[in-house]
Amino acid sequence: AQKVTQAQTEISVVEKEDVTLDCVYETRDTTYYLFWYKQPPSGELVFLIRRNSFDEQNEISGRYSWNFQKSTSSFNFTITASQVVDSAVYFCALKAGTASKLTFGTGTRLQVTL
Amino acid sequence: DVKVTQSSRYLVKRTGEKVFLECVQDMDHENMFWYRQDPGLGLRLIYFSYDVKMKEKGDIPEGYSVSREKKERFSLILESASTNQTSMYLCASSLTGSVQPQHFGDGTRLSIL
């Protein structure tokens, strides 16, 4: 069975601070994909990034970066110089094997204040 | 851009009513999904469909059914609504294959009184 754990329920930071959202996953499949989604107050989940289990390269996209470490089964997400518009709930998710189903973590609510 | 449209943003129904939530996608995706989202529980899969007239139970199918008569449309049905089905319902679609991300609608906040 698949499992995704986001231990941080809620994080509050002041604008321009860096913040890291943790994600730990469990699966017995050797082929899997990890995803991050953002859910702003409007409600729609927005796809941010996908990573496959064979590619441990870290990725940077503007102020966003992702650190994938198979040794610790983690796929952490860092926002550099946070902004108020980053305030949202962030979900980490896992797809394993050939399945089309996603297993989601419980989400981390990020509040960025001025 | 993929567009997943859910028919209502907010819906209020009474206990015992039959409730229909509709979802339409415009990108010819094979797979469609229904989730419910509750505080502290994240998103939980109710049902999904990988083709017209095909469906599979997700993690919490009890009290729900689905219908997929056309590729672009996936309906979630609450046969006899109960107060514990008050929740945010999210529809998603994707192409086939585990590499493909799911694309989500805006959600329907359903209240059962």
Image (cartoon, coloured by chain):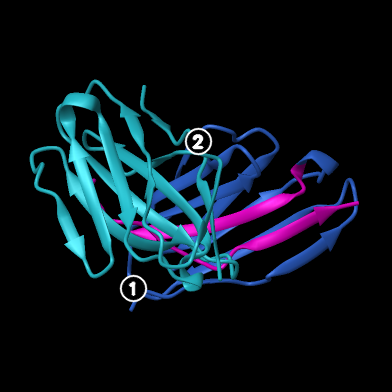
Chain colours: A cyan, B blue
Q: Answer with left or right where residue B100 lies relative to residue B58.
A: left
Name which quarter of the figure residue A5 lies in: top left
Residue A25 image position (x, y, % from top left)? 33, 30
Question: Which span is picked out in magenta?
Answer: B85-113
Label 1, on which residue?
A: B27
Using the image as rendered, state which of residue A86 and residue B46 is in the foreground: A86
A30 over A114 or under it: above or below:
above
Residue A111 image position (x, y, % from top left)? 56, 59
Q: Which callout, 2 or 1, points at the residue further toward the start of the chain?
A: 1
Name the residue rendered at 20%, 41% in the picture.
Answer: A68
Residue A16 image position (x, y, % from top left)? 41, 67
- At mark 2, the secondary structure is strand
Is A44 magenta? The answer is no
Residue A11 image position (x, y, % from top left)? 53, 48
Query: Which corner quadrant holds the N terminus of chain A?
Result: top left
Using the image as rendered, state which of residue B36 and residue B95 is in the foreground: B36
Label 2, on which residue?
A: B57
Is B99 magenta? The answer is yes
Kindly identify which chain the residue marked by label 2 belongs to: B
Q: What residue type is labelled 1?
A: Met
- At mark 1, the secondary structure is loop
Dot label at residue A4: none
Name which quarter of the figure residue A103 lies in: top left
Kindly identify which chain the residue marked by label 1 belongs to: B
Q: How busy is the neighbourhood of tag 1: few (under 14 within 10 Å), some, or many (20 plus)? A: some
Name the residue rendered at 60%, 67% in the picture.
Answer: A41
